[in-house]
Amino acid sequence: MLTVNGRRYALPKAPTVVICVDGCEPDYIAQAVSQAKMPTMKRWLAEGTALVADCVIPSFTNPNNLSIVTGAPPSVHGICGNYLYDAQTGTEVMMNDPKWLRAPTVLAALADAGQRVAVVTAKDKLRRLLGHGMRGICFSSERADQVSETENGIAEVLPLVGLPVPSVYSAALSEFVFAAGVKLLQKSRPDVLYLSTTDYVQHKHAPGAAEANQFFEMMDGYLARLDQLGAVVALTADHGMNAKTKLDASPNVIYLQDLLDSWLGAGTARVILPITDPYVLHHGALGSFATIYLDPAQAGAVIARLRERRGIELVLAREAAALRFELPADRIGDIVVVGERNVVLGTSVARHDLSQLELPLRSHGGISEQRVPLVLNRSARDLDTNRRLRNFDAFDLALNYAQ
């Protein structure tokens, strides 16, 4: 047994694969299974463990992937978004650097315990965080042609996988992750494998759409191969996904910076959108969670006015938000704002170029995207399913209940 961030984990008896399917609203699986696109998943749901769990809020990629691999919420590991305002330097930065990570990962601890560990992620923005402190293989689909033994623990990836480097804006970016996972399991037989995909398809297509079903049918084929190779597989997601549109299919946006500038005067408040990352075609930096920095003396009045605004689900002061969502209080603003299910939050109209956005807009970040699948290909014996289940219970279930 080993202990990581206060949780105990057994060492794997069989190869163990934990998969984070980016943007996997539970209905994607339900629709694909009902339309006979996922026979392997259908069998797992019947014979294995079929659960729905809560991801962490904000329901974005970085905080949830790091929660899954640390087995802890952002209040412990420190990654509270894809992007943040660094109050010490007065700059807005991506949270890709491991310097922001405050806790060790289960992956690193397993490697230190002598287990062979491998990580494949779709986007390179996650690679350094997921592989921090870990001895083993760690690379991204996005930069699979730029690997080295020193940086990634592997000299060549493309000959191993047998696929070209995919476009970052494609379903192929995720397929490369699955294909690499299967090849690694066949060739080097890691004890633990973590696979993390991209939500390109989910940002474009709703559950049950032909393109979505095609993606999940592809995924099911790789799940079958992992199963055949004798792996214990736990599949979850970093967040769900919803349409964020008006009745005319245009983006349903509340521009918070413009709103606050009109109330308080320009330069008085700063709105940060933690969804921000380099992949603007996915979501245009529009999600359903925002944080505001301003004079704390003005916070009460601003909170009251925002709570009256149609389309806003929740407004909390810093400490209340940190407590409710298990966030590091020193890395969020004075106010946290969460949009309703069909609403996204922006800064200013002038700062969001939506000309390249592939419409209609589908995005995430709020409480409405918190429910995610948590599925294992084996029965999780003796698991108390009445407890609050989280996506970051995936390693606990895979190692402690399903071996």
Image (cartoon, rainbow, N blue to C red):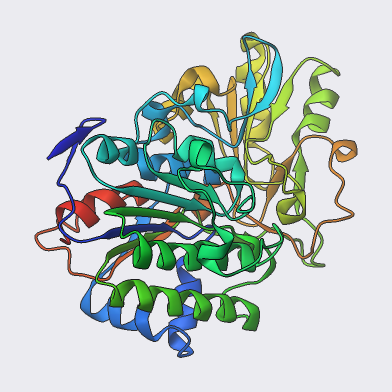
Q: Is residue 368 above or below residue 129?
A: below
Question: Is 302 in front, or is 95?
Answer: 95
**What is the x, y in percent for residue 167?**
71, 61
Is 241 rendered above or below residue 77?
below
Q: In which quarter of the image is the N terminus?
A: top left
- For the image shown, how many numbered marks are present on the structure? 0
Q: Can residue 313 be seen in this view?
A: no
The quadrant the C terminus occupies is bottom left
Q: Is residue 315 above or below residue 208?
A: above
Q: Where in the figure is residue 138, as x and y percent of width and height?
A: 47, 45
Name the residue located 78 percent from the left edge and 30 percent from the top edge: 257
Measured as percent of width and height from the top left, residue 149 is found at 49, 42
Residue 232: tell me if it is visible.
Answer: yes
Q: Is residue 380 left or right of residue 362?
A: left
Residue drawn 39% across and 30% down? 133
**Front position in the image: 285 or 187:** 187
Residue 215, quarter of picture: bottom right
Q: Nearer the viewer, residue 6 or 251?
A: 6
Q: Residue at x 43, y 57 (%)?
A: 371
Residue 9, horizontal then vertical, whole percent = 18, 43
Query: Is 93 on the left-hand or right-hand side of 69?
Result: right
Q: Which residue lies furthest to the left in this view?
A: 382
Residue 226 position by quadrant: bottom left
